[in-house]
Amino acid sequence: MKIVIVLILYFFIVVFDFIPLVKKRMKKEKWFYLSTLIITFIVIMLDSMSIYVPSPALLIKFIIDSVL
Amino acid sequence: MKEMISSKQIISLILLFVFGTSVVIGVGFDAHQDSWMSLLIATIFSVPLLLMYARLLMLYPGKGLFDIIEMLFGKKAGKVLIAIMIWYYLFLGGLVLQNFFQFISVTTLPKTPKVLIMALMMLVVIYLGRSNISVLGKWGIVISITIVIVVVLTFIFSIGNIDINHLLPIFEHSPKTILKGAVKMYVFPYAELITILPLASFFKKGTNSYKVFMYGLLLSSIMLITIQMRNLLTIGFPLMEYSFFSSYTAARIIEVGDFFSRIEGVITINLLFAVITKTAICLIAATKGMSKLFNIKNYKDIIVPVGLIILMLSIIVYQSIFEMEEFKDKYVVIYSIPFQFIIPFIIWITAEIKKKSIKVTN
């Protein structure tokens, strides 16, 4: 169920937002968009498949604990 | 035509931003029945900080935080500072969204997948962020009036449940404990108003930032104290501490006559509106920063991918409500200080020195 939701979400984003942007031929925007799209898709997909993804809060906690 | 927001709209956005999640999850309960004093102290602490933010904007009228950073520190050092602030806005947006999910999953939709709730919220936020900024401003006015009416009504309806003994004994806690609560309230939600600074480029010409921030602080403090008092007087401690969402618990026991009860749904709506506004402000701030960092002309072209980053962070940041509470209690103060105080202070001092040196050379 979760995986289907993620797939639908990204399908609509690609069709209705990313492809029109690519057609405008904006290079920087396109590469920023594409790299973000891939990274967020992988992370959200992993979480949807119940594969543990470490939280950035853990790093923050570790830094604060080691400093104090 | 350049996008603009009026002073009233900025004040309403400040009010909603401060409301954000604090209206429901509550803040700084360290001093228990004395926590209203912590709130008052936090408000007083916030005055110099907000005056500093306002002074920075008054020194460079019409410029947002990222424009000011680039002007003061140049391209290279400026970009490092911009990247640091972007992280703060992204993570804050993620935390706000996650707080909302925790509330919804505990109170209303325990079995609905996290990703569905958050993605739907994020779509609304992206839509709001992508619209003309005046849409956000008008939304701010309408929603802040709605929220104020709800808070006032719930307070009036709670009068029958008020027990003044919940406030006693006054000053039971040491000044240190009261101050500890005040510092937490100062960091969350008042000092988070640093997120408004990148939006300053949208302020109408001639906007007095001092007035805007002070009125915003005054109004939001009055509302927060009203909420805190309502919750304290109706449910009191220790119930307030044990229930993760004290406003929701306080609204649950409201009963007017035999026919008007179970109005906690309005608290959910309050939170929904405030969270949408707060996340939208975080999104716009982070996107403005990203467009500065990568030299992208129109920030709206990348608002969807930045929204996806916030969505991703909100999904992975906590696994449970207990992790959220632990982070809020133990780490959020220390984590926030560099972003809310140290970096803005450095920027402000540099701005003052540069302005003075320009005056001297003229």
Image: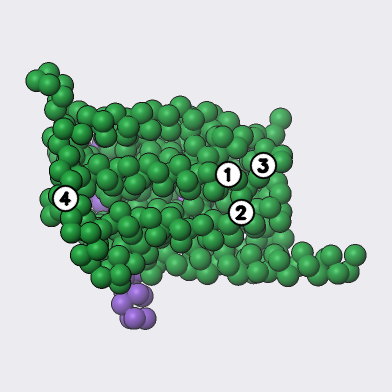
Chain colours: A purple, B green
Evaluate if marks 2 and 3 touch, with contact meaning CB atoms under 8 Å apart.
no
Q: Nearer the viewer, mark 4 or mark 1?
A: 4
Q: Amino acid at mark 1?
A: Val
The one nearer the camera, B311 or B224, is B224
Answer with mark 1 or mark 3, whichever residue precedes in sequence: 3
Q: CA distance from mark 2 to mark 3?
A: 11 Å
Q: CA distance from mark 4 to mark 1?
A: 35 Å
Q: Amino acid at mark 2?
A: Ala
Residue at label 1?
B212
Badge 3 marks a residue whose secondary structure is loop
| Pointer 3 local density, CA inside 10 Å: few below 14, some 14–19, many at least 20 | some
Q: Amino acid at mark 3?
A: Thr
Q: Quadrant of residue A55?
A: bottom left
Evaluate if marks 4 and 1 touch, with contact meaning CB atoms under 8 Å apart.
no
Evaluate if marks 2 and 4 touch, with contact meaning CB atoms under 8 Å apart.
no
Residue at label 3?
B207
- The relative height of residue A28 versus residue B132 in the rendered view (above or below) is below
Using the image, tell me which numbered label, if any, was put on residue B287: none
| Pointer 1 local density, CA inside 10 Å: few below 14, some 14–19, many at least 20 | many
Evaluate if marks 2 and 1 touch, with contact meaning CB atoms under 8 Å apart.
yes
Using the image, tell me which numbered label, if any, was put on residue B54: 2
Evaluate if marks 1 and 3 touch, with contact meaning CB atoms under 8 Å apart.
yes
Tell me whether marks 3 and 4 sit on the same chain: yes
Subunit that carries the residue with mark 2:
B
Outermost right residue: B362
Q: CA distance from mark 3 to mark 4?
A: 43 Å
- The relative height of residue B335 versus residue B142 in the rendered view (above or below) is below
Residue at label 4?
B166
Subunit that carries the residue with mark 1:
B
Image side of residue A15 versus residue B73, left or right: left
Image side of residue B11 versus residue A61, left or right: right
Badge 1 marks a residue whose secondary structure is helix
